[in-house]
Image (spheres, grey):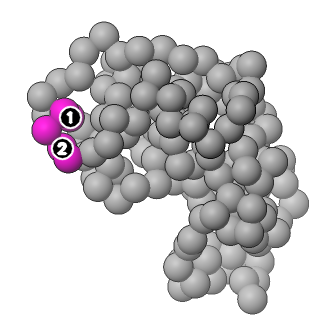
Amino acid sequence: MVVISDTSPLTALLQAGREQLLQALFVRVVVPPAVQRELLRAHTSLPPWLEVIAPIEVPASVSSGGLDAGETEAIALALELHPDVLLMDERLGRRLAQQHGLPVAGLLGLVVLAKQRRLIDEVAPVVRELQLKGGCWFGRELLVEICRSLGERWE
């Protein structure tokens, strides 16, 4: 499986020390150069398994979407590489990616997938780490619903 990631989910995973979830879930973890540059502003080094690939072309339908460089390049690269999933949390970027027929997941979706694949025992503690260390914010109602659907409780 291949994932292309935008900056914010990968930053949160790195800050929370949970980046190994990406490596455990996917055979390839790919980012475009703009995401690499954004990551290196906040991190001194990046995991050696992170592949950097530049999109050949950024379609006008993507470049005119009002997104930042990382989101724009991630969507353009996903259109070229056809990954199993595009990891992106920003609502506008997700909407544009979905309009282009791309399979999109956010950070919470990644954590749920890790639980389903038995890489983590519970979602709630990982989400709390992402909130405390990774600077993430998730709506309480969403967290209650996700945990309930997995037989867990959010408190």
Residue type highlighted by circle 1: Val
Callout 1 secondary element: helix
Residue at 18% in and 43% down: 65
Crowd class of label 1 (few under 14; some 14 to 19; many from 20; radius 10 Å): many
Residue at 34% in and 35% down: 69
67 left or right, relative to 28: left
Nearer to me, 143 or 55: 55
Up/down of 131 relative to 79, above or below: below
Up/down of 69 relative to 110, above or below: above
Residue 53 place in picture, x, y as percent: 48, 14
144 left or right, relative to 88: right
The answer to whether the residue labelled 1 contacts the one labelled 2, judged by CB atoms less than 8 Å apart, is yes
Residue 75 place in picture, x, y as percent: 34, 33
Residue at 51% in and 53% down: 106
Q: Which residue is mark 1?
A: 62
Nearer to me, 93 or 120: 93
Tell which residue pokes out farthest to the right in this image.
Answer: 121
Residue at 57% in and 71% down: 137
Q: Main secondary structure of the magenta part?
A: loop
Label for residue 65?
A: 2
Residue 6 located within the stretch drawn in magenta: no
The quarter of the picture where residue 22 lies is top right
Residue type highlighted by circle 2: Gly
Q: CA distance from mark 1 to mark 2?
A: 5 Å
141 left or right, relative to 115: left
Residue 59 place in picture, x, y as percent: 17, 24
135 left or right, relative to 73: right
Residue 63 located within the stretch drawn in magenta: yes
Residue range corresponding to the magenta coloring? 62-66
